[in-house]
Amino acid sequence: MPANRNVVYLIIGVLVVAVGVLSYNLYQAKKQPEGVQINLGPDGLKIQSK
């Protein structure tokens, strides 16, 4: 029985780490980029610093 419990704890630990890594990657992808943003649209050219 103790071996089965250790395997369950290992699987839960791996899942928690995987969710943490995926959450961090999603946060980084959605974060606003730093620097200068240049937009060219119907209203003309817009330059914004971030």
Image (cartoon, rainbow, N blue to C red):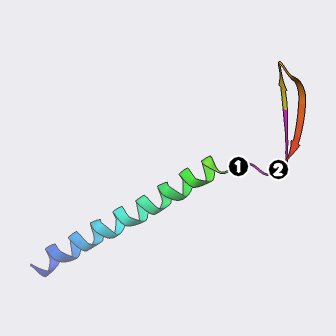
Q: Is residue 13 above or below residue 42?
A: below
The stretch drawn in magenta includes residue 36: yes
5 vs 41, left or right, is left
Label of residue 11 in the image: none
- Write the residue at 21% across / 70% down: 8
Q: Which residues are magenta?
A: 33-38
Label of residue 50 in the image: 2
45 vs 29, left or right, is right
Q: Position of residue 6 (x, y in %)?
A: 22, 76
Cα distance between the residues tagged 2 and 1: 8 Å
Q: Residues within 10 Å of mark 2 (few under 14, many from 20)?
A: few
Identify the mark nearer the N-term, 2 or 1. Answer: 1
Q: Position of residue 33 (x, y in %)?
A: 74, 48
For disc 1, the marked residue is 32
Q: Position of residue 41 (x, y in %)?
A: 82, 22
Residue type highlighted by circle 2? Lys
Q: Is disc 1 placed on a helix, strand or loop?
A: loop
Q: Determine whether label 2 and label 1 are within 8 Å by CB.
A: yes
Check the picture and name the quadrant holding the N terminus: bottom left
